[in-house]
Amino acid sequence: MAPQRESLLRTFALLGLITLSAITGAQVAVQWKLLRDDILERERVHGANAIRIEAYGVLERDDFIRWQTPGAQERFERFFRRAFLSPDVLRVKLYDAERRIVWSDEPQLVGRRFSDNTRLAAALQGTTLVHLERATAAENLFERGFRETLELYVPLSASPGSAPGTARVAGVVEVYKDPSRALASLSRGRRIILTTSLAGALVLYGALFWVVRGASRRLRAQRDALARHAAALDAANRDLTAVQGQLRARERLAAVGEVSAAVAHGIRNPLANIRASAQVALDAGTPDEAAKRLETITAEVDRLDRWLRALLDVVRPFTPRLGPVDVNALVTDCVAVLAERAAERGVVVDRTLAADLPAVSADEVQLQQAVLSVLENALDAVKPGDRVEVRTEREGLGEAGTVTVTVADDGEGIPPERLGRIFEPFFTTKTRGTGLGLAIARKVVEGHGGRVTLTSTAGVGTTVTLIVPEAAAELGA
């Protein structure tokens, strides 16, 4: 879940950075434009007013009409000296109403007309204009060497004192200024805007990141809590399913128990009589042929009696009589009991017993029956020449410690579709099996507080493990 937990923060970090960068960039661009427009507007207002004051104080009303007269030229020269002797003034041009240059500090421009100058046309309509440009237009014939300039068009009214745009325009003053001071002010403003915008964006990004990280942690905690609850519900559901299975099994066993007790009670007495009669006939010296049949009757009666006892062991309530049990000795005794049977089948039983194995608190007779049941199943599952391995081990220490008895065979294994029913009473994969061995083994081991596990692979073999708590867990040793 780690990648899922980090996805929200990664997504916010990326999208937040992109969004704030775009917003900050747009904000800076807008503020830069507003700052530029503000600087130009100040130049337009203050510069134009200063030029008009000087022009109306020096020039006469008809100077732009009789511009060729010596008096008009002298007043144009005086107006230039009073208004434009600032070092940042690069060029001055005076236009009449016909877009003709009537005076300039560049004498070669006098008398020229520039009919395609749209800004001049707007100024002749009474609009004061200011802008930054490079001198590349047709009217900039003698300003090619200038770098970027601040160009100001100031319309002069034929009626001094009238508001701009409300009276006939007699002429226009065009001024080219060095924009260094304006650009320096603009640059300082841009740096301030950029610095404050970036600082604000970083503060906002950090605050939002902190909020999102807190929200992510809360969501992660809620998700983890939901996962824990889901796991708990799943475990509870599994436990409930297991309990339901156990209840159903107990109900079946109870029903079988009632029937089995009645059947056993009705069958065991006649069986005992049959066996006793057969045994008497054998002891009386019956001929060989009849003796073989009587021995068969006796053996079958004994087998049926064992089956009845096993059936009653499965269905009868189980209360272990606990005492210290040496598991290694118990396993050795079980192997010895089945040694003759294993030899007859040509099966080798290997023992691997753990040294210093602690005693377990168990009912020795019942635990021996459980181990014998598992060993008998293993012997029935293998072919001549196969091997059965029995090993004991210790797992854990103290009250949590357990002793395990593992029986592994090289038989055909159990098909996967049958594994789910392998511990059910009367379920067997053998033609002559009773289906009670594993059911008895699990009942005995679980009655001691332990458990039985079984793993099997078709064509490879089966492993059954009996896990029993140590004696210290029950006896307080």
Image: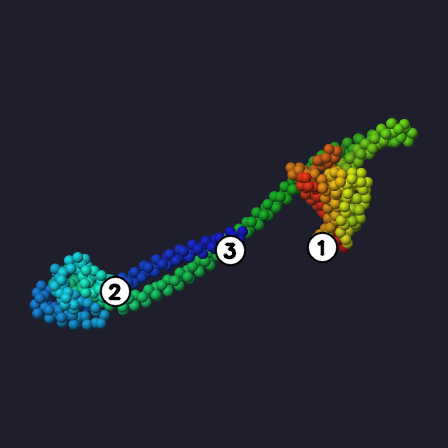
Mark 2 lies on residue: 148
Quarter of the image for residue 424 reads top right
Could you tell me the amino acid type at mark 3? Arg
Q: Nearer the viewer, mark 2 or mark 3?
A: 2
Could you tell me the amino acid type at mark 2? Glu
Residue at image coords 42%, 56%: 16
Q: Residues within 10 Å of mark 3 (few under 14, many from 20)?
A: some
User: In the rendered structure, are the residues bearing label 1 and label 3 in contact, judged by CB atoms less than 8 Å apart?
Assistant: no
Tag 1's secondary structure?
Answer: loop
> Residue 319's mark?
none
Quarter of the image for residue 346 reads top right
- Tell me if residue 265 comes above or below residue 189 in the rendering: above
Q: Quadrant of the C terminus?
A: bottom right
Could you tell me the amino acid type at mark 1? Leu
Which one is earlier in the sequence, the residue at label 1 or at label 2? 2
Residue at image coords 29%, 63%: 35
Name the side, left or right, on which 264 lies relative to 458.
right
Mark 1 lies on residue: 397
